[in-house]
Amino acid sequence: MKKNSGGIRTVITAGILLVLVIAAAWTWKQKKADESADAEIKIETPGEADDAPEEPVTEVTKTPTEAETTADPSAADEVARQEQEKSTFVTDYESEPLLSGTPIKYLSLEVGGTDDEIRLNWMSPSSSAGQVSWYTVQNGDFQMVTANCSSSRTMPGYYVNKATVTGLQPGMTYAYKVGNDAGGWSPEYRYTVPEGDTKEGFTFLVTSDAQIGQDQYQEEEVSIEDWDKVVTRLTRYVPEAQFLVHTGDQVAQFGNPEEYSGFLDHLGLYRIPLVPVTGNHDVANKQISEELGYGGGPYFYEHFNVPNRSEEYGMSEYDKDGDYYFIRGNVLFIVLNSTTNQPVDIHEEYVPKVIAEHPDTRWRVIIQHYPAYSSVAKYQERMDSQLRYSLGYICEDNDIDLVITGHDSIYSRSAFTNRRCERYDNYDYSTGGVAVNPEGTMFVVCGTSSGSLYQAATPNENLVFQSQAQEPTAIRFDVTDTELHLRAYTVDNWTVCDEYTIRKE
């Protein structure tokens, strides 16, 4: 009897174990299915990712309507993707403590005059010349570059260091830090040169009017955080970009050190060379100096180290900025100081001088702060005077293909215009259009890239597209030997709001 009872217990126990095994297997299978489903919709937050570039997110030019999403499940998925994409637009908090632990201030990385060059600028409490420790991650090649050092006129007790590193190669990653033993060293950062030969084509990015400290619509900390979000997204989503243009008004008050920190101290800006442009808030004049209660000084010049800087053309009243230029691939970029106290015809002398030195570039692009064709009512009459027509003369007389500006805090694209600022109407100016061998010059204005100021758009007869989305804006340009293609983004949801192509055949 006991023997039979034991057999029954054995059978019961085996049955229970079998049920438990089956239940465990089903639970495991269900968990893997759930994980797989989650993985399909997961979008990694840029601020939480490591330094490896993310794959660019598919660009969207239109949000589906409710009717479309009902009829098409894939459209509903796209709406969900856009919402989740927007939720990942967060600050890269890694950048907050970047320089707080060292005495080095205002480190910036600027574009070089040629492909194999990069320029650095920083301030240190040491009067001894600073150095750049620069090595190639892939092979360990090392160089130590000594900076030119001078006493700062805008930061008492600090010294401005400017250095140039050469020998850069496409596809290579470089680790660098700046400083010296006497004044301290910055943290170490990494910069990767995009792959490819720029003569075969390249990409660059445009931002504008971060204007840190302009708190008409939001607090300064919000503008700093939004600017960080934009820089983070651009450098992670477009790692192939050769450089980042900022078309002026880096700060709201040229003499405010906290605003310069708010503009410069971001991890993304240590991953890509900057093309800074003088804006009306970046340099002093007599009236502004009296309003703020302190004198002018070389604020722009001391914070940036630009290539081929003129010491004659484009000099402001109190600053040592000057016009400058650089070449990438088959493109000549000429950066003008439109806030100079010199007469506008000074640029009419400078531009042909630079072009005569580099006559064989395929494309010619001017970058400055003030637009010729403004979207802001209070600016339109002002730009109708000398500035607009001077740019018209410069562009037609020197075969300028494109002018990139800021100032408006509104995105806009013009028709092609001639030296009398008259538009050519025989082109398709719609979004997505292509102009083949166009006459005249196209003018593009980048809206604010920090959301610090949004202005109302007013129609302008020479503007064929205007957008005031009241969201941070940036522009991507892709250039080849035959095409110049632009895409303007509202950055927070990575949506294309405008697109256009100039083609040369």
Image (tube, rainbow, N blue to C red):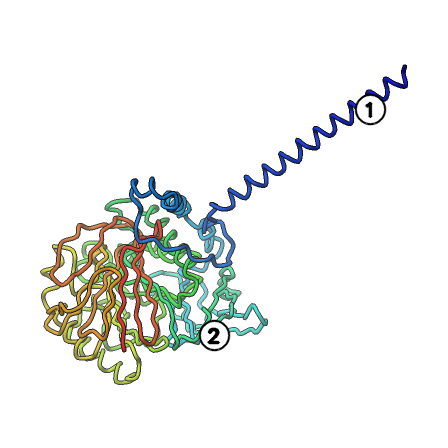
CB-based contact (under 8 Å), mark 2 and mark 1: no
Q: Can you tell which quarter of the image residue 240 is in?
A: bottom left
Within 10 Å of the Cα at label 2, are there few (<14), some (14-19), or many (20+) other Cα atoms? Answer: some
Give the residue type that dot 1 points to.
Thr
Estimate the x, y position of residue 54 in percent, counting from the top left: 47, 57
Estimate the x, y position of residue 437 in percent, counting from the top left: 23, 75
Point out the tag, 2 or 1, that comes first from the N-terminus.
1
Identity of the residue drawn at 57% across and 74% down: 141
Report the side of 243 relative to 404 (left or right). right
The residue where tag 1 is placed is 10
Identity of the residue drawn at 40% across and 68% down: 242
Q: Say if residue 74 shows up in the picture.
A: yes
The residue where tag 2 is placed is 168
Is 177 placed above or below 100 here? below
Within 10 Å of the Cα at label 1, are there few (<14), some (14-19), or many (20+) other Cα atoms? Answer: few
Circle 2 or circle 1, nearest the eye: 1
